[in-house]
Image (cartoon, grey):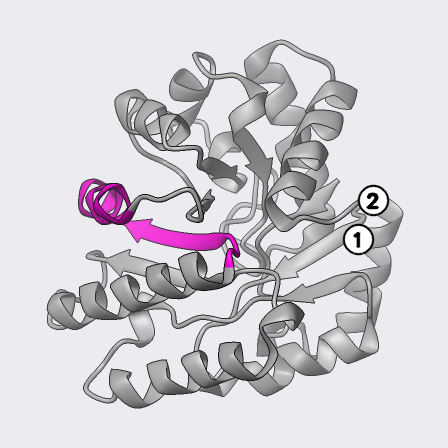
Amino acid sequence: MIDTHSHIYLPEFDTDRSEMIQRARHAGVEAIYMPNIDSSSTADMMALVQQYPGYCFPMMGLHPCSVRENFEKELLLVEKNWEANADFYSGVGECGLDYYWDKTFVGQQKEAFGRQIALASKYNKPIIIHSRDSLDDTIAMIDTAMSPELYGIFHCFSGRFDQLEHICAMGFYAGIGGVSTFKNGGLDKILEKQHLRHLVLETDAPYLSPVPFRGKRNEPAYLTYICDRLAEILQVSTEEVIETTNANAARIFNRNM
């Protein structure tokens, strides 16, 4: 299995990070892709890349919840990182729009997202998209900027089926995580109409733990619960879920895994 979205560099793992990595390996997690949040998270993310080369892969971007008055300064650091070492990063992100927590900086979020869409196209790298309570606007921005160089993942997809169809028609993938296991989440009814060829697995650790760990800290080893639930929803084998989502992840990140 491949965890396409995990923040294992955050302080929530400071007390047992090496053990958490061991549990992930034991559970069958072959690789962990780590989206950046902002300048405060970069050093800790890079430390993990150095400690676990070929297992933990970095991405570079500015999270919409970190877009504030100083977003220009933050975004400039992101752009400089890409200019200095574009081959090093596996994707642009986590970036996008978030209308859930605060709408004060929606205009700035859109500007920051637009500039990161341009980075993804410029460097031909996947873009990792955050779209909480903003999926229609997020899709519209991607639609407007669409080009052969633009592709990636709509992280933590939890929208409607028509939105999922639109995402897939654009050549993007939907990241499926712990929400798929929630009893009243409703995502199962959407996913049962979809095919695996448009889906990838993710945990978003330490957030959004799957059942039976809901409300507790999430970690990559719990990807097995998401995989099993997806197999149940789509009425396929766990092996097929792993094989297809691994192939999708390899296609997105251009790595032979």
Using the rendered view, name the quadrant where residue 189 is placed: top left
Left or right of 171 in this view: 132: left
Labels in figure, total: 2
Q: Which mark is residue 42?
A: none
Q: Give the residue at x 82% y 70%.
A: 52
Q: Which residue is at the front of the view, 241 or 171?
A: 171
Residue 39 horizontal/vertical position (percent): 46, 85
Q: Give the residue at x 48% y 87%.
A: 40
Residue topped by disc 1 = 24
Q: Give the residue at x 63% y 50%.
A: 253
Inter-mark Cα distance, 1 to 2: 5 Å
**Local SS, label 2:** helix
Left or right of 192 in this view: 240: right
Q: Identify residue type, mark 2.
A: Ala
Residue 110 horizontal/vertical position (percent): 19, 63
Q: Give the residue at x 72% y 37%.
A: 224
Residue topped by disc 2 = 27
Q: Which quadrant holds the N terminus? A: top right
- Residue 4 in the magenta stretch? The answer is no
Q: Identify residue type, mark 1.
A: Ala
Left or right of 228 in this view: 52: right
Highlighted range, magenta: 124-145
Q: Which residue is at the front of the view, 239 or 62?
A: 62
Other residues around mark 2 within 10 Å, as few (<14) / some (14–19) / many (≥20): some
Residue 8 horizontal/vertical position (percent): 64, 67
**Local SS, label 1:** helix
Residue that sits furthest to the top in the current view: 235
Q: Which residue is at the front of the view, 11 or 49?
A: 49
Q: Is residue 39 above or below residue 169?
A: below
- Residue 132 in the magenta stretch? The answer is yes
Other residues around mark 1 within 10 Å, as few (<14) / some (14–19) / many (≥20): many
Mark 1 and mark 2 residues within 8 Å of each other at the beta carbon: yes
